[in-house]
Amino acid sequence: MRVIREYERAVIFRLGRLLGAKGPGLIFLIPFVDKPRIIDLRLLSFDIPRQRIITKDNVTVDVDAVVYYRVVNPIDAVVKVQDYITASNFIAQTTLRDVIGQVELDELLTRRDELGKRIQGIVDEITEGWGIKVTQVALRDVVLPEEMLRAIAKQAEAEREKRSRIITAEGELLAAQKMAEAAEFYAKNPQAMRLRELQTWVEIARERNLIIITEGGVATGPLAYALAARKEEKK
């Protein structure tokens, strides 16, 4: 007697002949006659060792990934392949090298999810006959050479400088347009221009450095502000 867990299946061979998959629960085996092979049906994962790959634009990168899979047909996983874990790992390594070698570096850095799905589809199609379902392939890390890292940093710095200059130029253009509109408005309304001038005097007088030349002489500071105000009242 043997107990098989809920997430396991026992593939039974009797004198070398396949009887089928049994479980979960209590199963009965004939000693020295029945040979069970226990298969785990849970979601499993394995690491693809770091691969040194040359991209389409001749850049050498080191890429490693993780493959998530599960056994959906334990009989096929036992009968059709000697070691389904090792075989799946080798297929994933080969597919990773083939797919990454067909893309450029920029695509590799910006479209990891799409490349992972492409690798998943290829590996899943191959391992489907082994009773294995590949659920996800995730590109975990992409290591670039030091020279390429410096080149990318310079490119990013140049891009930021470009954006900064564009934003500054746009700001100057907008300011010039607003100043032209203000000048046109003041030309049509001299009273508004005069009020703006007085407001400027008041702002300068707060710093005690206002100097106004009048008919009677030179007035400074708060006195200048008072004279300017009286002059406006008389007008």
Image (cartoon, grey):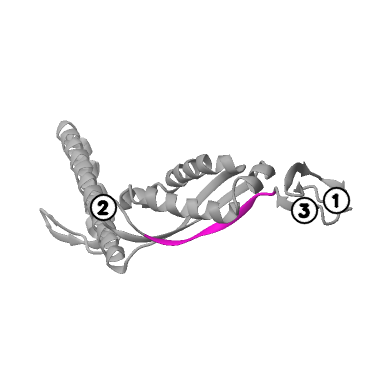
Q: Residue at x 25, y 58 (%)?
A: 155
Q: Earlier in the sequence, mark 1 or mark 3?
A: 1
For the residue pair 177 and 95, the one nearer the viewer reads as: 95
Identify which residue, 51 or 75, lies in the foreground: 75
Identify the element where label 2 is drawn: loop
Residue 230 in view: no
Whether residue 72 is in magenta: the answer is no
Q: Residues within 10 Å of mark 1 (few under 14, many from 20)?
A: some
Nearest to N terminus: mark 3 or mark 2 = 3
Q: Disc 1 residue type?
A: Leu
Disc ID at residue 15: none
Circle 3 packing at 10 Å, graded few (<14), some (14-19), many (20+), is: some
Main secondary structure type of the part rendered in magenta: strand
User: Marks 1 and 2, how far apart in space?
Assistant: 59 Å
The label on residue 57 is 2
Q: Which residues are magenta?
A: 42-52
Q: In this rendering, would 216 be left or right of 80?
A: left
Q: Residues within 10 Å of mark 2 (few under 14, many from 20)?
A: few
> Residue 50's image quarter?
bottom left
Q: Amino acid at mark 3?
A: Lys
Q: Is residue 90 above or below residue 71?
A: below
Disc 3 secondary structure class? strand
Residue hosting label 3: 35
| Real-space Cα separation, disc 1 to disc 3, in angstroms | 8 Å
Residue 152 at x, y percent in the picture: 29, 60
Is label 1 or label 2 in front? 1
Horizontal and vertical percent position of residue 72: 66, 41
Q: Identity of the amino acid at label 2?
A: Asp
Q: Which residue is mark 1?
A: 29
